[in-house]
């Protein structure tokens, strides 16, 4: 078959020869079958996804989980069966939670397949037939009509007013006008190949024919599929940090256990006793509940985000949002409304502005910042009448009286002209009924204009709209104050300046003219009709920015997050929208796809930090951009809604798809979906992500200070020649139940003030920073002092090891429950945040305390946990010693705050 080449640079006859096909009769059935056997079906093929069992096994690769499994095996070997069973149950619970949350594996390929047209109209054996699109082969002649999906990549050989919506592939908000006769030279971006059509895009207007040049995985959409499939999932920052933390804890645990075991043997202690002591230390060192609590807190965060219009598909993406430093956003439909809107009108030397949002026919006209009645101006009324009548689009209304919605059927550019007329009080439907279209000369890309004929005010008229410079060149008169005058050079200069001024604001501009005709021609000749016209005015339109996006971007900047626009649209348009939203300043750069093609990856990395707008880019460019930003050490969130966004969504640290306008491909490739397509919801999600990460730090802070205290209690007791104060089953109870409920409550802590006014944390910053390490050291030390103090006091008073261990057990739990309250903020004192402001904490600590009471006062549990019943007066010393770590924590916060200042 044909080699990969730039088909857009060849004439249709050359392509016909290269692909050995006849432009009129197409391929023969036999030749088509032969080619199908050679190249395969016209469909997208993907690799097999993971099974549930494979996903389950993935959950056991975590280093901390492996250490837990090892600890359970050791417990089983030495006869501590209860310990072993409990640890294994916790590991299994954590694995199941992880699989349930992440079971919806990526289905991007299935979504891509759905976009392929199920049927295609082709010419085979000289006849027009319909075949399954999957049976298309290179060389087939395909017929395109309005409403059709393009079934393969085509080089057009015929186009009649053909327009194709390529927004999902290129990001352009306006349908692309196609011209089969054009031959393009050099390297041409995807969005500018106006002699080609691409698989998965939609014909919105006109008709045409094309030769199939690529099928299946070799199409532009197939190349995207390959990119998605070749991409390997990366660990999130939290996963990396938890894994590092697990390794540190595991190694430290093994080292300490080894030291204690060897020391004990040298001191002459029995081998089995020392082995059990080492097991006690292992149980004390590892926060068994940590993996499960992290999973549960992230899952709860996912549920909260749903209320803020964000669906998180992957568990750890919740935290990743909080560390985001750059948000790469598609323009069309994300930062803009994806609804072309007429903003300015130029008539008779005056500029009028139009308010209103999208396709809603509600808005006002203004002249010199004063509200203006457009129907009181005959010239303006004439322009709006022409724009409504010389128009093939329709405005449709749906919904109830309380919640109405509008949509445009047809070309968005024509649709916004109808909306502008409606805002002025001119109904396109009523105008067409009173002034029906009697004849037309359809738009084509060569003439760049359209003309319709009407009976208007008892006379016949031709109404024309088109490119401003062409409309001006065809006009020899001009309408001023409802009178017709010869057009002067000064008039032309004024109109061209007005056109340039609107274009410089990234407005798409159309010109309007008319002329009386004696009769309606049966076969109108454009050259005869479209000359000596009466020029009326200009209309400038744009796909406007979302109003809420501007506020969201402002908050992003306050939070130290850089917003970057990546779009397939033109550079001028992209820069204008970016300026309006406050995304760029005098130090910002804007690059195009052609600029990127000239750069090496290293050069792009060097300039990426200064670029805020990337325009006219392709899917491959988006991947390079995301990689360049990541190589500068950033955590990248990528938003988008089109097929063209899918690979970059996959490659980014977190991909965010639009839920309403987004394609299935984008949704399946993303980590998060916005249910309201609102950029502002991303900011809310980032805020939630920051809060969740802060809370994860809080409960890790809490758990580790407790676990290190447990290690020190046993280690120091051994060095002092004391009996081991706590048994393995007691330590396991502490780690899995007593500590778990307060830790979960810390995960539900409300956001702290000013969380979105702080810069993003350094992605390389460990979970435990120096400040937190100091606080853990202080807490662990004071808890060790408190527990060993009670243990020695009780041992000296009663000489009963079981009683002393019970005192130590109760004191440690009491101090840890108070410790949970001080962990609610790393900086604020408990009286500032309120002791009872987190009801989850109140409930969690109360439940943990009741569990302690159960272990002390229920006979069956006393036997299992080797405790004794304490009297009411025994609690005095427990409370006295147990409150010491709480006081030390609050004093440490004050000291560190002053030291920081």
Image (cartoon, helix red, strand yellow):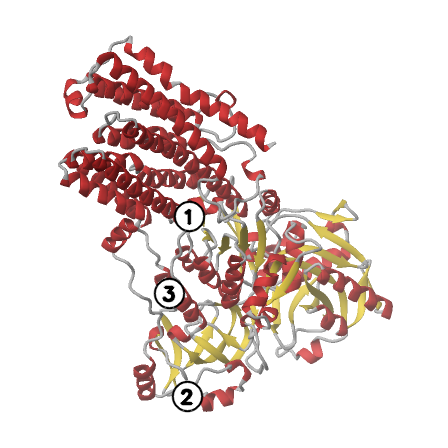
Residue position marked by numbered label 2 in the rendering: 25
State which quarter of the image contains the N terminus: bottom left
Which of the labelled discs sits on residue 229, or is there none? 3
Assess disc 3: are there few (<14), some (14-19) or many (≥20) residues with their C-alpha within 10 Å of its C-alpha: some
Q: Which callout, 3 or 1, points at the residue further toward the start of the chain?
A: 3
How far separated are the C-alphas under marks 1 and 2?
54 Å
Assess disc 1: are there few (<14), some (14-19) or many (≥20) residues with their C-alpha within 10 Å of its C-alpha: many
Q: Which residue is drawn at 58% across and 28% down?
A: 898
Residue 773 image position (x, y, % from top left): 45, 36
Q: Which callout, 1 or 2, points at the residue further toward the start of the chain?
A: 2
Residue 840, visible in the rendered structure: yes
Q: In this view, does 839 lie above or below 121?
A: above
Residue 633 image position (x, y, % from top left): 52, 55
State which quarter of the image contains the C terminus: top right
Q: What element carries label 2?
A: loop
Residue 86, visible in the rendered structure: no
Would you identify the image quadrant in which residue 4 lies? Answer: bottom left
Q: Which callout, 2 or 3, points at the residue further toward the start of the chain?
A: 2
From the viewer's perspective, tell me whether residue 237 is left or right of residue 589.
left
Residue position marked by numbered label 1 in the rendering: 317
Residue 178 image position (x, y, % from top left): 55, 74
Q: Are marks 1 and 2 in contact (CB under 8 Å)?
A: no
In the image, farthest residue toward the top? 873
Q: Nearer the viewer, residue 858 or 352?
A: 858
Nearer to us of marks 2 and 3 is: 3
How far separated are the C-alphas under marks 3 and 1?
20 Å
Q: Which residue is drawn at 65% across and 50% down?
A: 582
């Amino acid at each position: 078959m044909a080699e990969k080449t730039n088909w857009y640079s060849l004439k249709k006859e050359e392509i016909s020869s290269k692909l050995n096909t006849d432009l009129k009769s197409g391929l023969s059935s036999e030749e088509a079958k032969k080619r199908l056997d050679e190249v395969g079906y016209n469909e997208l093929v993907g690799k097999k996804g993971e099974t549930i069992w494979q996903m389950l096994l993935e959950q056991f690769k975590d280093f901390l989980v492996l250490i837990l499994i090892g600890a359970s095996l050791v417990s089983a070997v030495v006869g501590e069966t209860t310990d072993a069973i409990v640890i294994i149950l916790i590991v299994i619970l954590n694995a199941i939670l992880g699989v349930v949350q992440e079971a919806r594996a990526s289905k991007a390929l299935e979504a891509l397949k759905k976009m392929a047209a199920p049927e295609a109209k082709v010419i085979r054996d000289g006849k027009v037939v319909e075949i399954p699109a999957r049976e298309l082969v290179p060389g087939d002649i395909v017929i395109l009509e309005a409403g059709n999906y393009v079934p393969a990549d085509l080089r057009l050989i015929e186009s009649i007013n053909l327009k194709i919506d390529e927004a999902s592939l290129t990001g352009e908000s306006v349908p692309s006008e196609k011209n089969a006769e054009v031959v393009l030279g050099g390297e041409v971006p995807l969005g500018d190949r106006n002699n080609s059509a691409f698989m998965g895009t939609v014909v919105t207007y006109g008709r045409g024919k094309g030769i199939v040049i690529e099928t299946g995985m070799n199409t532009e959409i197939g190349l995207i599929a390959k990119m998605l499939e070749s991409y390997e999932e990366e660990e999130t920052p939290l996963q990396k940090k938890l894994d590092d933390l697990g390794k540190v804890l595991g190694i430290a645990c093994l080292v300490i256990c080894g030291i204690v075991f060897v020391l004990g043997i040298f001191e002459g202690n029995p081998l089995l006793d020392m082995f059990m002591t080492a097991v006690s230390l292992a149980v004390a060192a590892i926060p068994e509940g940590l993996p499960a609590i992290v999973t549960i807190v992230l899952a709860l965060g996912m549920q909260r985000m749903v209320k803020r219009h964000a669906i998180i598909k992957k568990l750890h993406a919740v935290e990743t949002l909080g560390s985001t430093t750059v948000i790469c956003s598609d323009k069309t439909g994300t930062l803009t409304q994806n609804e072309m809107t007429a903003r300015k009108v130029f008539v008779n030397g005056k500029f009028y502005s139009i308010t209103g949002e999208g396709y809603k026919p509600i808005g006002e006209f203004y002249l010199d910042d004063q509200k203006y009645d457009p129907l009181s101006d005959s010239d303006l009324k004439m322009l709006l009448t022409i724009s409504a009548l010389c128009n093939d689009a329709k405005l449709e209304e749906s919904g109830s009286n309380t919640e109405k919605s509008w949509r445009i059927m047809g070309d968005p550019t024509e649709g916004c002209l109808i909306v502008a007329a409606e805002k002025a009080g001119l109904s396109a439907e009523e105008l067409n009924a009173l002034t029906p279209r009697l004849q037309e000369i359809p738009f084509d890309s060569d003439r760049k204009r359209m003309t319709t004929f009407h009976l208007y005010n008892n006379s016949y008229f031709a109404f024309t709209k088109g490119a401003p410079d062409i409309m001006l060149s065809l006009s020899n008169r001009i309408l001023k104050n409802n009178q017709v005058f010869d057009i002067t050079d000064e008039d032309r200069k004024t109109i061209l300046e007005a056109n340039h001024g609107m274009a410089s604001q990234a407005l798409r501009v159309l010109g309007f003219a008319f002329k009386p005709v004696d009769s309606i021609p049966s076969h109108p000749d454009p050259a005869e009709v479209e000359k000596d016209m009466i020029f009326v005015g200009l209309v400038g339109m744009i796909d406007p920015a979302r109003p809420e996006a501007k506020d969201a971007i402002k908050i992003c900047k306050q939070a130290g997050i850089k917003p970057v626009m990546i779009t397939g649209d033109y550079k001028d348009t992209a820069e204008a929208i970016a300026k309006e939203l406050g995304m760029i300043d005098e130090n910002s750069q804007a690059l195009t796809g052609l600029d990127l093609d000239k750069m090496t990856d290293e050069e792009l990395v060097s300039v990426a930090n200064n670029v805020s707008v990337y325009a006219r880019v392709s899917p491959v460019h988006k991947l390079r951009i995301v990689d360049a930003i990541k190589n500068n050490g950033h955590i990248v969130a990528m938003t988008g809604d089109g097929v063209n966004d899918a690979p970059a969504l996959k490659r980014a640290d977190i991909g965010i798809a639009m839920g309403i306008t987004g394609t299935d491909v984008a949704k399946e490739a993303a980590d998060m979906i916005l249910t309201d397509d609102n950029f502002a919801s991303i900011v809310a999600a980032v805020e939630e992500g920051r809060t969740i990460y802060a809370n994860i730090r809080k409960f890790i802070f809490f758990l580790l200070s407790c676990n290190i205290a447990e290690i020190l209690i046993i280690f120091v007791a051994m060095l002092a020649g004391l009996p081991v104060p706590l048994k393995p089953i007691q330590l396991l109870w502490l780690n899995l139940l007593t500590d778990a409920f307060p830790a979960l409550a810390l995960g539900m802590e409300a956001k702290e003030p000013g969380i979105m006014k702080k810069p993003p944390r350094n992605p390389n910053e460990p979970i435990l920073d120096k400040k937190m390490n100091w606080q853990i050291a202080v807490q662990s030390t004071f808890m060790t002092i408190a527990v060993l103090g009670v243990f020695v006091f009780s041992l000296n008073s009663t000489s009963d090891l079981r009683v002393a261990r019970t005192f130590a057990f109760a004191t440690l739990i009491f101090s840890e429950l108070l410790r949970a309250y001080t962990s609610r903020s790393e900086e604020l004192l408990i009286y500032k945040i309120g002791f009872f402001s987190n009801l989850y904490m109140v409930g969690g600590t109360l439940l943990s305390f009741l569990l302690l009471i159960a272990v002390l006062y229920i006979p069956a549990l006393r036997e299992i946990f080797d405790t004794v019943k304490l009297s009411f007066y025994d609690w005095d010393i427990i409370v006295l010693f147990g409150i010491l770590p709480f006081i030390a924590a609050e004093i440490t916060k004050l000291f560190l705050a002053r030291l920081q200042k």
